[in-house]
Image: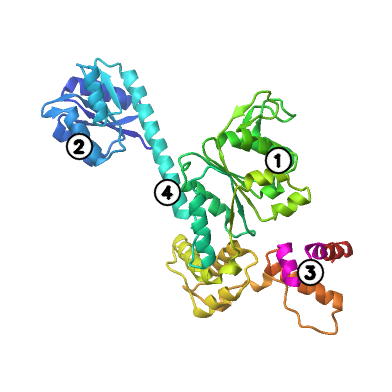
Amino acid sequence: MTRTRILLVDDEPGVRLGMKGYLTQHGFDVDEATSVAEAQEGFRTHRPDVAVIDYRLPDGTALELLPRLKELDAAVPLVVLTGHGSIELAVQAVKEGAEQFLTKPLELAVLKVVLERLVAQRRERQRLLADRSRTARTQVDPFLGNSPAIRALRDEAERVRDSDSPVLVTGETGSGKSVLARWLHEGGPRKEAPFVDLNCAALSKDLLDSELFGHEKGAFTSAVAAKQGLLEVADRGTLFLDEIGDMDVAVQPKLLKVLEEKRFRRLGDVKDRRVDVRLVAATHQDLQVAAREKRFRSDLYFRISTLILHVPPLRERAEDVPVLARHFLAEMGAHRGRGQVELEPDAERALMAYGWPGNIRELRNVLERAVLLSGSSRLSRSALRFESLLPAEEPLGEDLTLEQLEHRHIERVLAREGGHVERAAAKLGISRSSLYAKIKGWQHKGG
């Protein structure tokens, strides 16, 4: 592990010797300076983790030195030592950038604790900045493209971003709902607080209940210790519930209570806990239909749908496909050290002509597979393999019955509509209930 570097600024040799010996013994690397000028040069050269500065120096005072060091690196904590402490001097030192003002004679153990705390705080700030920077580098812009559909979505999203009201993000699987949810958080007033996401479709009722609300020790057989729920983790931040349409009906009233009263109870607890979160939910289902069919509570639907953002499927903004493709290829080329990977005109035309039932996620997968399997810096049409994801277009012939032809045609329409039954029914010119009946009939026959 890298040792912590301290810049010790004091013109008294005995003081420096004692402090350096003690700090070195406890795992610090210590650089020394005896004046304002040496301190500036040492700070510039060694860039310490913390600087410890005596107030009185041969060519000036710490009050003169502090702003100069802050100009060099404002993130480095500065500690001022003095044998003539006063409240006024301490206040002035803090105004000039000192994190701590300590009076001599000073116990070295106390100095060690102060330095360790300041270093820990600085490293935590660096970690948070690194995480934020990494997120900014890797996160896809949810509005890449110039189509009217994506421009309209951007306009709507910008209007609701600063609101505290729940947002329901709708759209097909793979269309970018989770990316939009994170964008709402990162650009909103809660961006300094946690963004916590949970996929409701991935958990059973009991696991979802425990993950969301937490539990007390002994709440159930395997609860050997108390557990904080994701609601508490997200306090003052954003809670993103993906695929909320798959949330168990028994859990839904508890979520509604949180939204209306900002209170909840852990499993096995008898007292309420307060929480302040902004809810962003996402679903590929039609929740109005689910509410009519009693698969989703209507009161919860009305509460979470205060603001609705619909992410259009990729086939409805084909002109954005080349923009997205170039973005993904640049990212993949840089990641694999291959430089820029480009599309041949025939490949670009093929991407725009394809229906993309899996939306942006499928586009990324197709391109990633092409980059991995192709050794070329230019991808042609032959490098793209996506037709196999749709049912093959079989020629009509005497070997197929009318029922088989209907079955194949419906399969193709469903695939092109990303599995969305209501839109597929509209394309086919039949009611949604009729299409459900046909699908169930095939399932009973094993088709």
State which tag comes first along the sequence, 1 or 3: 1
Q: Of helix, strand and loop, which one carries label 1?
A: helix
Circle 3 packing at 10 Å, graded few (<14), some (14-19), many (20+), is: few
Q: Distance between the residues labelled 4 and 2?
A: 27 Å
> Mark 2 sits on what residue?
68
> Mark 4 sits on what residue?
133
Regarding residue 33, the answer to whether it shows in the image is: yes
Circle 2 packing at 10 Å, graded few (<14), some (14-19), many (20+), is: some
Q: Nearer the viewer, mark 1 or mark 3?
A: 3
> Mark 3 sits on what residue?
430
Residue 317 horizontal/vertical position (percent)? 56, 68
Q: Residue 9 carries which label?
A: none
Foreground pick, 320 / 160 = 160
State which tag comes first along the sequence, 4 or 2: 2
Q: Which mark is residue 252?
A: 1
Q: Which residue is most to the bottom?
A: 398
Magenta-tinted stretch: 420-436
State which tag comes first along the sequence, 2 or 1: 2
Tag 4: amino acid = Ser
The count of marks equals 4
State which tag comes first along the sequence, 3 or 4: 4
Q: Nearer the viewer, mark 2 or mark 1?
A: 1
